[in-house]
Amino acid sequence: MSERLPGQPAAANKPVRVCPQCMHPTRKLYRIKHQALGDWDFACAVCHARLIEDNPHYVYGGAISGTPRRRRAKMPRTTES
């Protein structure tokens, strides 16, 4: 989901996601489990802090940000005889 933040030029905009917990736009979401038998959820930094506080069922599953990481090209293997 890509949206423009108000008041920013188009060139400065990066993909923005919406936090499914609070519905606020954010550039970074955290993948978490916060219920005993729950599925993976996403949360912004504010909701993440609220959901993990004193939560014995909390499991961190990584972060997803607006800009994907650039992968390095693999070097071709050389065979030595």
Image: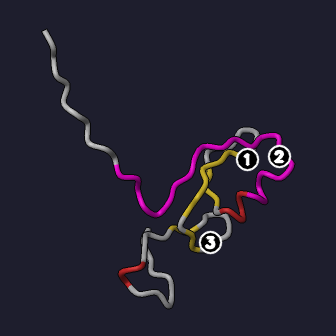
Q: Is-magenta flag for residue 55? A: yes
Q: Which mark is residue 55?
A: 2
- Categorize mark 2 by other alpha carbons within 10 Å: few (<14), some (14-19), many (20+): few
**What is the CA distance from the residue labelled 1 to the residue labelled 2?**
7 Å
As drawn, 1 above or below 37: below
Q: Residue furthest top?
A: 81
**What is the CA distance from the residue labelled 2 to the residue labelled 3?**
22 Å
Q: Secondary structure at mark 1?
A: loop
| Quadrant housing residue 30 | bottom right
- Categorize mark 3 by other alpha carbons within 10 Å: few (<14), some (14-19), many (20+): few
Q: Residue furthest bottom?
A: 7
Q: Is-magenta flag for residue 23? A: no
Mark toward the start of the polypeptide (1 vs 2): 1
Q: Label 3: which residue?
A: 23
As drawn, 51 above or below 46: above
Q: Residue at the location (62% across, 51% down)?
A: 41
**What is the CA distance from the residue labelled 3 to the residue labelled 1?**
18 Å
Amino acid type for the residue under numbered disc 1: His
* In the image: residue 6, left or right of residue 47: left
Mark toward the start of the polypeptide (3 vs 1): 3
Quarter of the figure that contains the N terminus:
bottom left
Q: Which residues are magenta?
A: 49-70
Q: Residue furthest front?
A: 81
Q: Label 1: which residue?
A: 34
Q: Residue at the location (56% across, 52% down)?
A: 63
